[in-house]
Image (tube, helix red, strand yellow):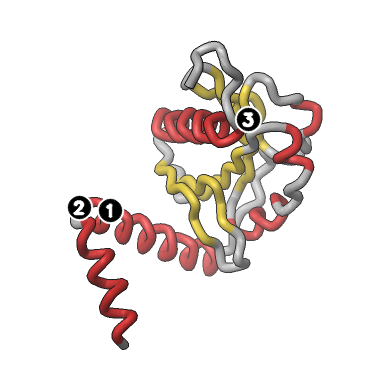
Amino acid sequence: MDLGAEPTIPERSLAIRRAASMLCFQLGWSPLHEMPLPNNRRADIMALRPDGGFACIEVKSGPRDFLTDNKWPEYREYSDSVYFAVDMDFPLDLLPLETGLIVACSGTAEVLREPPVHALSPARRRALLHRFATLAAQRLAWLQDPGAQNSLRMALRVE
């Protein structure tokens, strides 16, 4: 990549995601990327907080990304709070006030606005926690033994 060139959309998105994840770690949150939800949506980052709550972080690489994707209200059903994570170039006035705001800059991120909390029901929290833990454990196992994932896929094809 040319050092003077404008970052591509995927590069921008990755930089925001990395900075938001680092912020999660600093806050004591446990982030999990690309978490499938029961409503067929996929959270960019779902973070389990120390209090047992869930924060959904939607990464937006630019205004076009935000304006063409209006699924974000559907994440509320599966999180206690919803945040948008953007970079310094994003026009912040586009983002809804009923969400939290995380701004990334030069590899770091900061929460500029906390969202209103809408607590999950105990049953939904338990189901979401189970889904979160299962996915995190699977991903860790696959990292520790990359061949296991391929073996499992092959075994499932045979059945």
Residue furthest to the front in view is 2
Please state the horizontal and vertical placement of residue 129, each as a whole percent of the image. Answer: 44, 60
- Marks 3 and 2, the one that precedes in the sequence: 3
User: Disc 2 marks which residue?
Assistant: 144
Residue 51 visible to an observer of this rendering: no
Residue furthest to the top in view is 4
> For numbered disc 2, what is the local secondary structure?
helix
Q: Nearer the viewer, residue 104 or 6?
A: 6
> For numbered disc 1, what is the local secondary structure?
helix
Residue at 63% x, 34% y: name it.
61
Residue 106 vs residue 98: left or right?
left
User: Disc 1 marks which residue?
Assistant: 140
Tell me if label 3 and label 1 are in contact, CB under 8 Å.
no
Tell me if label 2 and label 1 are in contact, CB under 8 Å.
yes
Please state the horizontal and vertical placement of residue 34, each as a whole percent of the image. Answer: 49, 51
Residue 14 visible to an observer of this rendering: yes
Tell me if label 3 and label 2 are in contact, CB under 8 Å.
no
Please state the horizontal and vertical placement of residue 81, each as a whole percent of the image. Answer: 62, 45
User: Disc 3 marks which residue?
Assistant: 86
C-alpha gap between disc 2 and disc 1: 6 Å
Residue at 61% x, 53% y: name it.
119
In the picture, the quarter occupied by the C terminus is bottom left
Amino acid on which disc 3 is placed: Val
- Marks 3 and 1, the one that precedes in the sequence: 3
Residue at 66% x, 36% y: name it.
100
- Note whether 71 is above or below 60 in the view shown: below
